[in-house]
Amino acid sequence: MERLLLNILLLVLLTYLIGLSFCQHPGLSSNGDKTPYKKPNFIVILADDVGWGDLGVNWGLRRDTPNLDKMAMEGMRFVDFHSAASTCSPSRASLLTGRLGLRNGVTHNFAVTSMGGLPLNETTLADVLKKAGYLTAVIGKWHLGHNGPYHPNFRGFDYYFGIPYSHDMGCTDTPGYNLPLCPACPPHSALSSHQKDCYPEIALPLFENLQIIQQPVNLTSLAAMYTEKAIQFIHYASQSNRPFFLYLALSHMHVPLTVTQPLRKLPYQDPYGANLREMDTMVGKIKDKVDGTAKENTLLWFTGDNGPWSEKCEYAGSVGPYTGMWQKERDGSSAKQTTWEGGHRVPTVAYWVGRIPANVTSPVLLSTLDIFPTLVSLANASLPPRRRFDGIDVSGVLFGQSSKGHKTLFHPNSGAAGKYGEIQALRLDQYKAFYLTGGAKACDGSIGQEENHQPPLIFNLQRDMQEQRPLNVKSAEYRAVLPIISKAFGGILEDIATDNVSMADYSHDPAGTPCCNPQHALCRCQLAYLNTSFEKYR
Ligand SMILES: *[C@@H]1O[C@H](CO)[C@@H](O)[C@H](O)[C@H]1NC(C)=O
Ligand SMILES: *[C@@H]1O[C@H](CO)[C@@H](O)[C@H](O)[C@H]1NC(C)=O
Ligand SMILES: *[C@@H]1O[C@H](CO)[C@@H](O)[C@H](O)[C@H]1NC(C)=O
Ligand SMILES: *[C@@H]1O[C@H](CO)[C@@H](O)[C@H](O)[C@H]1NC(C)=O
Ligand SMILES: *[C@@H]1O[C@H](CO)[C@@H](O)[C@H](O)[C@H]1NC(C)=O
Ligand SMILES: *[C@@H]1O[C@H](CO)[C@@H](O)[C@H](O)[C@H]1NC(C)=O
């Protein structure tokens, strides 16, 4: 009797276990729908101010990215992929909302003293994924508002570790390479220097969740800390039995460039190259962790927030062949902050073993705006209602099943000339049209004048990737393409005018400055390492 009961019990247990293991290891069948759907993990690595030409496999002038080059061999490399804006905050806001700045309200950068941030009625990618059961983390630079409800922990992220804005927006004891060269934070409150570009009056804070754990942050150890936290998060999350979303917003390749090793020992390598290698090594470590934990079920997507910051001269990256010659012949830079290709064409690689075909170079026209709808679709979640999106679901392109990207892309003003956020250039197939041109500050200090173009300047990128010679307005090619371009331009303005759009609060107040020790004029403090909780803000 007892034995019979035991047998029944064993049978029940066995059935249960088989069922359980089936549920836990469904994977993704190649035919799609036989096995239960397991939500994939997502890692988006966003580099700062990286140039299209910085990736060895893109341009080859430098060979400082062996890990990214290898990832491209094992995944898909995009050569016509664009950031949604050419400067920091708008680019990040668009990545996290799938909407252009004119819709989400973020059209220029937030400051150290900004009270507001990404408007609260905008829904972030992390909000959507968290609701879909994801564990979410942002590690690195936020730059979408740091006060009150704008803090990342209230924008859908369970975990935050990083700096609230760019790492040149506060002094440190480890200042790194920059132009102008910035001094270290004064040890005490005395403010000797008033160098405008160097923020001597406030130390740069490092946050873990809502708490400042270091001020000023030690830039020399920041990359290692980001890597460590990212790896810990991936480890924790892949054991938690929940899907995860990690948004890793690196400080590389933005200035100040960290002093990684004494440069005299590396005569063959410039600071930019050394930092590029450091970034590449970080990406390699993240990929190794993925390969060792959740390889079959993780999409790793590397891209950039905008082009190189040319005014920083030898501390800026390379635009590759996208030199924006028309602008350069008239002064000013044609990279970051501009709508020339060098401002927004960013190196991009996507990797997912078994799903994304290996060693493919994709010429499809895509944008960081597409990350939102694509991840939402792969997570089988829904887009937030009552608003329109500029990004599209490109999972078919990632999986090699489709070559359909954007027919048009719209490039907003990002600070060089014109009104913040306004669409000043657009892409239509191989054509690029400018209604307004302008350069950013160049290494030689020149700034290209703002110029309106009615009718627009139109370049054929297929023949002229340098954007050097616009089409003759009398040519058959110009006359054929102009009506389609005008229609697209009118169309986007109309579409935005009838959308639900948000307004960002760009007000400033010294009280908005992050400060962990108001007793000290620079806010200096140093907390012991806290025990990391990855789910504090669920
Ligand atoms: C910064 O971190 C580096 C590397 O961990 C360490 O060697 C250095 O002493 C630290 N500097 C300061 C000022 O704490
Ligand atoms: C990747 O593709 C390139 C060009 O198509 C080819 O030369 C190379 O051998 C491929 N590499 C691998 C590892 O398949
Ligand atoms: C996707 O979500 C819908 C409801 O939103 C659900 O009916 C469907 O079963 C889900 N599909 C998968 C594959 O989980
Ligand atoms: C804007 O919001 C209103 C009210 O929620 C809604 O009825 C309308 O459909 C929305 N418009 C768009 C373009 O989604
Ligand atoms: C955000 O709020 C403003 C003001 O209430 C509203 O006009 C706008 O439509 C909202 N945006 C979205 C996306 O709902
Ligand atoms: C952190 O964790 C360690 C070991 O788990 C524990 O001894 C310590 O008290 C914790 N510290 C804090 C600040 O919670």
Image (cartoon, rainbow, N blue to C red):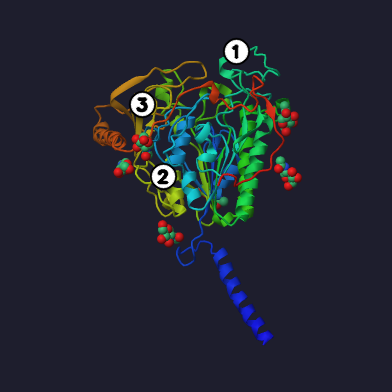
Q: What residue type is labelled 1?
A: His
The image position of residue 486, as x and y in percent, is 26, 33
The residue located at (62%, 75%) in the rendering is 13
Q: What residue type is labelled 3?
A: Arg
Side (left or right) of 327 relative to 358? left
Give neighbour class at mark 2: few <14, some 14-19, many 20+ (Cα, 10 Å): some
The residue that label 2 is drawn on is 364
The residue located at (72%, 25%) in the rendering is 264
The residue located at (57%, 46%) in the rendering is 71
Q: Give the quadrant of the N terminus.
A: bottom right
Q: Which quarter of the figure has residue 278?
A: top right
Between 203 and 406, the one nearer to me in the picture: 203
Q: Nearer the viewer, mark 3 or mark 1?
A: 1
Q: What element carries label 3?
A: loop
Q: What element carries label 2?
A: loop
Q: Nearer the viewer, mark 3 or mark 2?
A: 2
The image position of residue 111, as x and y in percent, is 51, 25
Between 130 and 516, the one nearer to me in the picture: 516
Give yes or no for contact between labels 3 and 2 (Cβ–Cβ under 8 Å).
no
Q: Which quarter of the figure has residue 165?
A: top right
Q: Residue 469, labelled with which disc?
A: 3
Q: What element carries label 1?
A: loop
Between 29 and 532, the one nearer to me in the picture: 532
Side (left or right) of 452 relative to 166? left
Give yes or no for contact between labels 2 and 1 (Cβ–Cβ under 8 Å).
no
The residue that label 1 is drawn on is 194
